[in-house]
Amino acid sequence: MKVEKFPGSKEVDHCPVYYQQVPVAPQSFARIYPLMERHVRPSRLRYEVQTVFVFLCVLFLLSACGKDDSVEKLKIGDRAPDFAVTDMNGERLSLKKWAGTPVILRFWSTDCKYCRADTPVFNRYYETYKQRGLQVVYLNTGASSAEVAEFVKELEIPFPVVLDEGGKIAEKYRVKIVPQTIVIDPDQKIKAAILGGVGKAELDELVGNYFH
C-alpha cells in the first residue's frame, strides 16, 4: 500500500504528519485519514516525562512521610536507647553498666575524612579521662572487619570499637548520616548529637564539666 505525504499538509512542531490514501468506493480515493507521526513530538514527550517524574516524587514523599510517622524521634533530653554488644576485642559492652558516667558514641565510616582527622582528638580525650570514668565507643556500619581493624591499627584507637552489624544500634539512635557523635550524660540521657567533625573545645563544653 502506498504511503505518501498528503498534499497541502503542514508540519507541526517540525514533525510532518503522514497520511494514507484508502479506497472507500469503486474508482474513488476520496477519503483520507492520518496514519501516523514519524516522530514523537518533543513538546509532548517532555510533558509526559515531567508528568511521570512528578508522580514518582509524590509517591516517594508520601512513602517517606508514612515511615517518619511510624518511628518515634529522639530529642535532646530523651533517655538513650540501651544496647549490649561485643566489641572487636571480644569484650561485652552494655550502656546500662556505664550509668553514672558520660558516654560518647561515635558512628563513623572508614572512608570518612572527618573520622580520620578527629580520631586523634578522641584518643587524647579518652586517655586523659578514662580513669575518671569516661567511655568512648566507635561504631561502624558497612565496612568489613578487616577494613575496620586496619583503621583502628593505623590510628591507634585505644577505646572499644564495634561492628554495628545490620546497623541495629544506629537505627536505635536514628543515625542515617555519618560521622555523627552522640553524647550521653551520667543519667543516660542524650545531651547532644553532633554531625561532622568534633574538636577538643566541643568535647570540653559537653563533657569536660563532669571531670572538673
Image: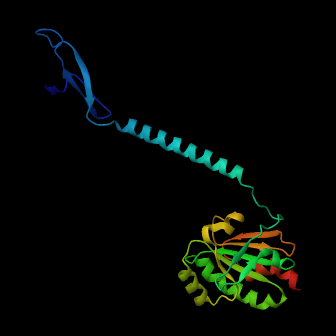
Looking at this view, is 130 or 194 the one in front?
130
Q: Residue at x 25, y 34 (%)?
A: 38
Visible residue check, residue 27: yes
Residue 128, placed above or below residue 55: below
Q: Nearer the viewer, residue 186 or 54?
A: 186
| Left or right, residue 93 beside residue 53 | right
Query: Horizontal and vertical percent for residue 44?
Result: 39, 35
Which quarter shows the N terminus? top left
Residue at 72%, 81% (x, y): give it. Answer: 92
Work out whether residue 7 can be spotted: no
- Residue 28 rendering spot, x and y as whole percentages: 14, 10
**Looking at the image, which residue is at 26% across and 23% down?**
34
Quarter of the image holding residue 80? bottom right
Q: How many marks?
A: 0
Is the C terminus in the top left, top right, bottom left or bottom right quadrant?
bottom right
In the image, farthest residue toward the right: 212
x and y percent of residue 95 in the render? 78, 75
Quarter of the image for residue 121 reads bottom right
